[in-house]
Image: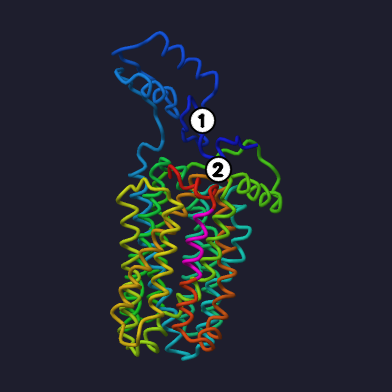
Amino acid sequence: QEPIQYIRGYADFFGISFHVAPGVLIPRPETEELVETILKEKQGAFRILDIGTGSGCIAISLAKHLPQATITAWDISEMNNWKKVFAIIWTGQLFSILSSNVVGFAVLLWLSVETKSAEVLAMGTLALLLPHSLLGLISGVFVDRWSRKLTMIFSDLFIAVCTLVIAAIFFLGTVEIPYIYLLLVLRSAGSAFHTPAMQASVPLLAPAEQLTRIAGINQMIFSICNIAGPLLGALLIGFLNISYILLIDVGGALIACCSLLLVSIPNPERKEKTKLNIWNDLCEAANGVRAIRGLVCLFFISVLATFVIMPVSVLFPLMTLIHFSGSTFQMGIIEVVWGSGMLLGGGIIGIWSWKTNKVLLINAMYLLLGFSFLFSGLLPSEGYILFAVFSFLGGMAGSIYYASFVAIIQRRVAPKLLGRVFSAYSSVSLLPSMIGLLATGFIADTVGIDITFIISGSVICLLGVTSCFFPAMLSLGKNV
């Protein structure tokens, strides 16, 4: 069984809470006797060297009570070179995500031009989301059992091979729409394993106090790719055959694989190897989440927020075209502005190490995002510029919210459970959102796009306020 201190992420020692995780010895009560003995026998100015300090409980406790002493704490860790490791990983991921965004947008644009069918585009979106949502319910079980490094590599290679096959079909001139659906389904299936494997590996590679910054930089990378991907995709499809554009994704996946081969990614320790039982493994993860006070509530509110946000996110183009009587160019500006806000949000939380309670920060971002939707819906038809400003603020809020959310999960949940927790959360949040997406057209046509923005914004603001009244959930955001 996992020690409760590892599940909570901290242990109390000599009146101080210390961060602990697998690989760090849990401070013991009998060790407090050593600290008490030193405090009785030593006073004044002297030197103490703590070799193999671990959590630092002895050195920090002594430093607190012996202000005149000079205390040095030493330890070694595989995480000392975490910056170099992440620089290599991020380089590969930048090429992989950017190429995927370029190809994804180019494929949807190709479908639009070739079919001029809204139904085909809807099916394409469904093919891109549904496999990830369904496979995510169980993919984390395998992520937590397999080598996470190899899981990411083979997921990238799987996506590359599938894309290469579809590119060959385009070259042969025998392409049909179902082949495109198949490509999107397979790419989605590959990401259902790659994404949780990457998210679950971060706490094993970096110090706990850096998790929020890493999540912020990840958001920056996604934002850059979300801005540049559609622009490059639209540019390339103007003078390149779609088959050549597909090869760009193959190249991006291979670069990502090579970057992963250059780094060592540890796997969490499992006390015993058990026979694969998907249900038992999922129950183990669920019990681990329930054991952390406030975490279920955090997940539930996040799923509700995603359910409300997702349908509105697809209405931004129609809001520009219909409510503000804008052009397709203005519609593109809103997409870039939203992405720029996400980029700034990731930069704020990735570059500056904020010491604030991360759950309170999430709640504040709910309010900012909710107000951006609410005020956008209240704008008159000539308020396009203000709509762009609110879109920028909404993108920034969404980025800060998600980076903080990921960091809390990585800090509080045991590493051996993270694959299951992240994949299951992704599925649980996406599946209701897809229902919301299917109802978007009916809601917008029935009550109006602007009213939809107002209602959604009000609900998100309500969630942000309500979240402040759960003390157990608020405690999760401390020291993250």
Nearest to the observer: residue 334 or residue 221: 334
**Would you say residue 324 sits in the magenta stretch?**
no
Identify the residue shown where x is 39% and y is 29%: 76
Give the answer, above or below, for where 226 lies relative to 6: below
Residue 351 shown left or right of residue 262 in the figure: left
What residue does disc 1 label? 12
Horizontal and vertical percent position of residue 246: 41, 73
Residue 176 seen in the current view: no
Q: Label 1 to label 2, Cα distance in Å?
A: 18 Å
| Helix, strand or loop status at disc 2 | loop
Q: In the rendered image, which quarter is residue 93 located in?
A: bottom left
Q: Would you say 424 lies left or right of 45 here?
A: right
- The prevailing secondary structure element of the residues shown in magenta is helix
From the viewer's perspective, is the residue at label 1 or at label 2 nearer? 1
To which residue does mark 2 refer? 414
Residue extent of the magenta highlight: 459-469
Residue 398 image offset from top left, x and y in percent: 41, 64
Is 462 included in the stretch rendered in magenta?
A: yes
Secondary structure beneath disc 1? strand
Q: Who is closer to the viewer here, 352 or 203?
A: 352
